[in-house]
Image (cartoon, rainbow, N blue to C red):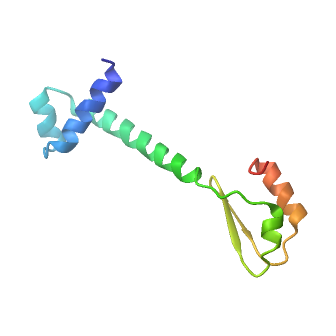
Amino acid sequence: MKKYDIWKERVADYRTSNLNAGEWCEKNNLSRATLRYWVTKFNKEKMNKDDHQQTNDFVKFTIQDLAHNPKETITINFNKLSINVSEGFDPAMLREVLDAIGAYD
């Protein structure tokens, strides 16, 4: 078993143990600093995974779809960028912006 997998199991055990870090480490004869390292590593992985999943939610649209709804304001989210499109927008400029950020095929 790889070190990563061993620590994945250890961190899961720690989280379900109802012990604080010091107690759990003493019981398992492990360093608190090492436990903290792996807990932080797995927390960051989960955050990155959650962020990635959120940015993959999308609705396919065309510039024409947006142009035919002039009374609505539409927000386009792409990664950490938000573009608000409202009545009177320039479809050509929107297309250029989306092409520039790689959000539109």
The location of residue 87, given as percent across then percent down, is 80, 78
Instruction: Judge left or right: residue 10 versus residue 74.
Output: left
> Looking at the picture, does residue 75 appear above or below residue 18?
below
The location of residue 57, given as percent across then percent down, is 58, 54
Q: Residue at x 16, y 33 (%)?
A: 25
Q: Residue at x 83, y 71 (%)?
A: 67
The location of residue 3, given as percent across then percent down, is 32, 21
- Quadrant of the rendered structure where residue 61 is? bottom right
Numbered label tally: 0
Q: Image quadrant for the N terminus?
A: top left
**In the foreground, 74 or 69:** 69
**In the foreground, 76 or 42:** 76
Instruction: Judge left or right: residue 30 versus residue 78.
Output: left
Furthest residue in direction right, as rendered: 92
Q: Residue at x 21, y 29 (%)?
A: 31
The location of residue 4, given as percent across then percent down, is 35, 25
**In the foreground, 103 or 3:** 103
> Looking at the picture, does residue 6 appear above or below residue 47?
above
Instruction: Judge left or right: residue 28 versus residue 70.
Output: left
- Quadrant of the rendered structure where residue 16 is? top left
Furthest residue in direction bottom, as rendered: 71
Q: Residue at x 31, y 38 (%)?
A: 39
> Looking at the picture, does residue 82 appear above or below residue 44?
below
